[in-house]
Image (cartoon, rainbow, N blue to C red):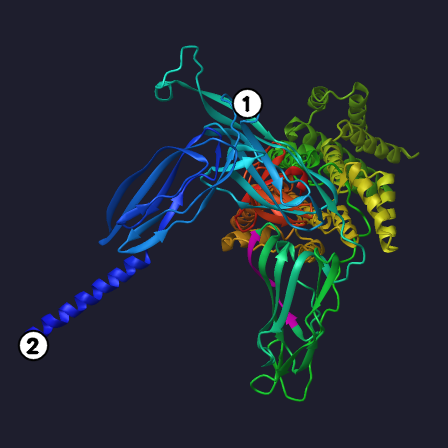
């Protein structure tokens, strides 16, 4: 067994040796390395290279060049071990130093080597010799050129633009690079070298080292002569310092070099863009090039409520990047979802080549055999100079009942034989305009933070202070017994006078004067805080004097007291004396009480009047007659279908500085009717910002967004944030502002109730009620402020141009990151010059020119 094993090992060794030899034999190469272009009198190297060790070298018969040296041979071998894997390389080279003498094209014949008895030859090599130029930096030593692959195209026809740098001197760096801007084009960078590599090129008989800086694919979006603006850069060039001393053979090794900055500019380029011919088919959506179309269902038959997709593939060469999904009319029983687009393409001089796939997800809701009308796709063929329409033919799909033999609608099972169908929308449109009162206000239409708002809050605080002062005084006066008697003096006196009046009518003389006398003494006691013991004539006289009662009134009061006292003990003289004395008493008491006029009621009435004026002014403002006329005129024109005239009226109101949620809503409706979807979205957004509770504006905004080309997924937000926003959007900023005023008034009332409540239970109720009113008032105030900040921050905008390029930097030389279309909403982060840094709802950011968008 041991002897057999050794024999097998020898066989395997021989087999591996033969395999190695075959592999080595198959990998032998022999080639030439030399420049393609040289100058007259230039010295250059020609190297023949082999990866095997030859036994002999047969040099070529070189003609047309002076052989300065060679052939000199050299050998090089290397070994590498990476991750335990060993690799070896071996190279033998034969080098000539040649010098060109005459201009023209010359050929280096093949050289040959012999390896293991077999001969290998190199390919012949052509070298072009051109006339050289003198030293120094001239105007043509460094050039920047932009070349176009085509000089005349039609609108939508792709072409390629290449920016190249040409130099005859060493370049160590670049500054102030300004790449070309392509206004009027859809542009995309297809080649952006990270490491610039120079290769020799012959430019009009002069040798240059040329390098590609950028390569773009352009698709013109307008017709006529389009100019591509110049591009420029500053090149840092190293040149040998000039010396007046005699030249030495060592100057090339030891001479000094200096750095020079040279600005080079690529001249402006012009491209003629012809319009597409008239008579474009209805299915043409701007595709230019040469395309094919395939359309098919993912399933030919299925049951109701199962999913399938219609796949449309458009392939070819041209502006496939801008090709849009063909329009397809589906049966009413088919539920259609958002179209998914997939693109696989490469870019070249004739545009993008590849496939663009559109997937239409569908769910048939009812059984039957459904036919889809032929799908048409039209494009302009550049070679044939005509429109070509492709058709898919009629598509058929069979839909059976679901697994239970039923058709399902809205989650309910419908028995077989019953053909129920959901109510389906045959069309969609914006909800109708706002009529009636316009609610227009000058300037900012938001009530929160205005002078009227602050005055109302101040009026509430002032009223609270006045009412508290009055109530405090009332309580203080109620504690003053003398004061109470003073204030009740008239009432008590008039009560006694009524008794006296009854006696007067009965003509009871003595009793009448007794009661009249008691009324006067009682009035003096209560009014002047006199005790019964002090009710003498002298002390009453002194009290009247202290009260600054007029002398005539004082004497009349004392005389009437004397008359009453005398009459009590004398017979009735008759003649109406009793009635005269009764009238004298009434007149005296009225005169004494009427000396002071209460002012509290007047103050309260004045305060309430001021508050009412402020409230009415805040609610209705001052709307001039011409604004109302324009508002009514715009509404009438809209109802008549004259949308352009209606828009003029609405915009005139806006130009006058007036604003309201209804005005923004109506302008958005009018723009939508006119087909200007970007403007419609802009004004619907403004209407929603002014009044988030307006369901019509929110619904119209959603409908307008359906017509926007860009579908962007938003980054999910924290659920608490969503809840707070939904609560905040229950009312507008004005609604929350008025609610905060209501809660402020309620808080003031409950605090007064808490202060003056007479029971513990009522004080508790008023305290907790006031705390709740304070919390709700502050919340309302916060929501009103937040909604107003949303409206005034101006940190969102709508793209207004049909196609807008989003750049990586705030200049036209920046790389195009993505394309946005009219109606897309962006968040504005910062501004530099005429550029704005924006962010999409999915988090992507970039720079866009300010003229491409409008702030909400």
Marks 1/2: CA distance? 85 Å
Q: Residues within 10 Å of mark 2 (few under 14, many from 20)?
A: few
Q: Are marks 1 and 2 in contact (CB under 8 Å)?
A: no
Q: Residue under label 1, please give it.
A: 138
Can residue 388 be seen?
yes
Quadrant of image for the C terminus = top right
Q: Can you name the residue that lies furthest to the left here?
A: 2
Where is residue 110 shown, x and y percent of the image? 40, 47
Q: Secondary structure at mark 2?
A: loop
Q: Secondary structure at mark 1?
A: loop
Where is residue 466 shown, x and y percent of the image? 65, 34
Q: Residue under label 2, please give it.
A: 1
Q: Earlier in the sequence, mark 1 or mark 2?
A: 2
Q: Can you name the residue that lies furthest to the right here?
A: 575
Can residue 324 be seen?
no
| Residue 582 placement: quadrant | top right
The residue under the point 61% across, 56% down is 711
Where is residue 506 shown, x and y percent of the image? 86, 44
Where is residue 13 shown, x and y percent of the image? 17, 65
Q: Eyeballing the image, is 801 above or below 68?
A: below
Q: Which residues are magenta?
A: 335-347
Does the magenta-highlighted stretch encompass residue 615? no
Q: Residues within 10 Å of mark 1 (few under 14, many from 20)?
A: few
The residue under the point 69% across, 45% down is 800
Q: How many marks?
A: 2
732 or 10, which is in the foreground? Answer: 10
Q: Can you name the residue that lies furthest to the top here?
A: 245
Q: Main SS of the magenta segment?
A: strand
Does the magenta-highlighted stretch encompass residue 344? yes
612 or 352, which is in the foreground? Answer: 352
Q: Is residue 335 left or right of residue 502?
A: left
Quadrant of image for the N terminus = bottom left
């Amino acid at each position: 067994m041991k002897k057999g094993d050794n024999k097998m090992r020898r066989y395997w060794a021989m087999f591996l040796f033969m395999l190695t030899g075959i592999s080595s034999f198959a990998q032998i190469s022999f080639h030439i390395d030399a420049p393609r272009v040289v100058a007259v009198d230039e010295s250059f190297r020609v190297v023949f290279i082999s990866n095997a060790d030859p036994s002999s070298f047969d040099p070529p018969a070189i003609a047309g060049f002076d052989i300065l040296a060679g052939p000199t041979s050299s050998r090089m071998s290397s070994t590498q071990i990476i991750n335990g894997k060993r690799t070896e390389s071996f190279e033998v080279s034969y080098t000539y130093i040649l010098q060109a003498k005459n201009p023209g094209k010359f050929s280096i014949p093949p050289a040959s080597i012999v390896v293991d008895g077999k001969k290998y030859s190199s390919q012949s090599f052509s070298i072009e010799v051109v006339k050289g130029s003198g030293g120094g930096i001239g105007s043509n030593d460094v050039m920047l050129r932009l070349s176009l692959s085509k000089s005349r195209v039609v609108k939508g026809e792709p072409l390629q633009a290449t920016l190249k740098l040409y130099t005859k001197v060493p370049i160590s760096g670049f500054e102030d690079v300004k790449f070309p801007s392509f206004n009027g084009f859809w542009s995309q960078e297809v080649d952006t070298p990270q490491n610039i590599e120079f290769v020799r090129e012959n430019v009009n008989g002069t040798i240059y080292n040329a390098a590609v800086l950028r390569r773009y694919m352009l698709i013109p979006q307008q017709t006529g002569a389009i100019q591509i603006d110049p591009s420029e850069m500053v090149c840092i060039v190293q040149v040998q310092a000039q010396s007046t001393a005699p030249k030495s053979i060592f100057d090339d090794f030891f001479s000094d070099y200096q750095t020079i900055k040279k600005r080079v500019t690529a001249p402006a380029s012009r491209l003629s863009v012809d319009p597409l011919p008239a008579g474009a088919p209805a299915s043409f959506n701007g595709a230019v090039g040469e395309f094919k179309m395939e359309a098919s269902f993912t399933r030919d038959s299925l049951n109701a409520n199962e999913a399938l997709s219609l796949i449309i593939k458009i392939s070819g060469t041209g502006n496939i990047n801008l090709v849009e999904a063909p329009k397809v009319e589906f049966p009413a029983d088919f539920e259609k979802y958002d179209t998914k687009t997939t693109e696989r393409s490469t870019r070249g001089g004739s545009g993008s080549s590849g496939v663009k796939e559109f997937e239409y997800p569908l769910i048939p809701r009812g059984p039957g055999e459904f036919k889809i009308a032929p799908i048409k796709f039209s494009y302009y063929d550049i070679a044939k100079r005509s429109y070509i329409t492709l058709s898919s033919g009629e598509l058929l799909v069979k839909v059976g009942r679901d697994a239970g033999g039923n058709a399902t609608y809205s989650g309910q099972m419908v028995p077989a034989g019953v053909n129920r169908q959901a109510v389906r929308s045959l069309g969609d449109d914006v909800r109708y305009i706002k009529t009636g009162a316009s609610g227009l206000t000058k300037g900012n239409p938001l009530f929160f933070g205005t002078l009227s708002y602050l005055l109302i809050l101040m009026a509430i605080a002032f009223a609270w202070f006045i009412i508290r002062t009055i109530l405090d005084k009332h309580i203080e006066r109620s504690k003053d017994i003398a004061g109470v008697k003073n204030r009740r003096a008239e009432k008590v006196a008039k009560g006694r006078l009524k008794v006296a009046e009854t006696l007067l009518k009965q003509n009871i003389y003595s009793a009448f004067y007794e009661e009249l006398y008691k009324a006067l003494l009682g009035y003096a006691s209560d009014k002047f805080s006199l005790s019964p013991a002090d009710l003498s004539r002298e002390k009453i006289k002194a009290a009247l004097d202290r009260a600054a009662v007029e002398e005539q009134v004082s004497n009349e009061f004392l005389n009437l007291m004397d008359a009453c006292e005398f009459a009590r003990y004398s017979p009735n003289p008759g003649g109406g004396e009793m009635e005269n004395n009764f009238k004298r008493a009434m007149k005296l008491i009225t005169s004494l009480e009427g000396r002071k006029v209460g002012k509290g009621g007047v103050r309260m009435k004045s305060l309430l009047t001021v508050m009412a004026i402020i409230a009415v002014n805040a609610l209705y403002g001052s709307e001039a007659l011409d604004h109302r006329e324009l508002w009514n005129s715009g509404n009438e024109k809209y109802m008549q279908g004259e949308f352009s005239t209606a828009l003029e009226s609405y915009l005139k109101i806006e130009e006058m500085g007036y604003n309201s949620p209804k005005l923004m809503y109506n302008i958005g409706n009018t723009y939508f009717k006119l087909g200007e979807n970007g403007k419609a979205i802009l004004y619907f957004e403004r209407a929603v910002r002014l009044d988030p509770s307006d369901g019509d504006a929110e619904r119209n905004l959603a409908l307008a967004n359906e017509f926007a080309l860009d579908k962007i997924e938003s980054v999910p937000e924290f659920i608490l944030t969503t809840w707070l926003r939904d609560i905040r959007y229950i009312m507008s900023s004005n609604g929350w502002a008025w609610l905060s005023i209501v809660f402020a008034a309620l808080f003031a009332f409950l605090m007064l109730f808490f202060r003056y409540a007479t029971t513990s239970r009522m004080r508790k109720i008023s305290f907790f009620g006031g705390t709740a009113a304070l919390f709700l008032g502050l919340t309302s105030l916060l929501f009103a402020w937040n909604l107003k900040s949303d409206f005034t921050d101006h940190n969102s905008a709508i793209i207004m141009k049909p196609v807008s390029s989003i750049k990586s930097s705030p200049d036209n030389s920046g790389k195009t990151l993505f394309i946005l279309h009219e109606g897309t909403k962006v968040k504005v982060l910062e501004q530099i010059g005429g550029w704005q840094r924006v962010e999409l709802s999915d988090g992507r950011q970039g720079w866009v020119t300010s003229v491409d968008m409008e702030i909400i």
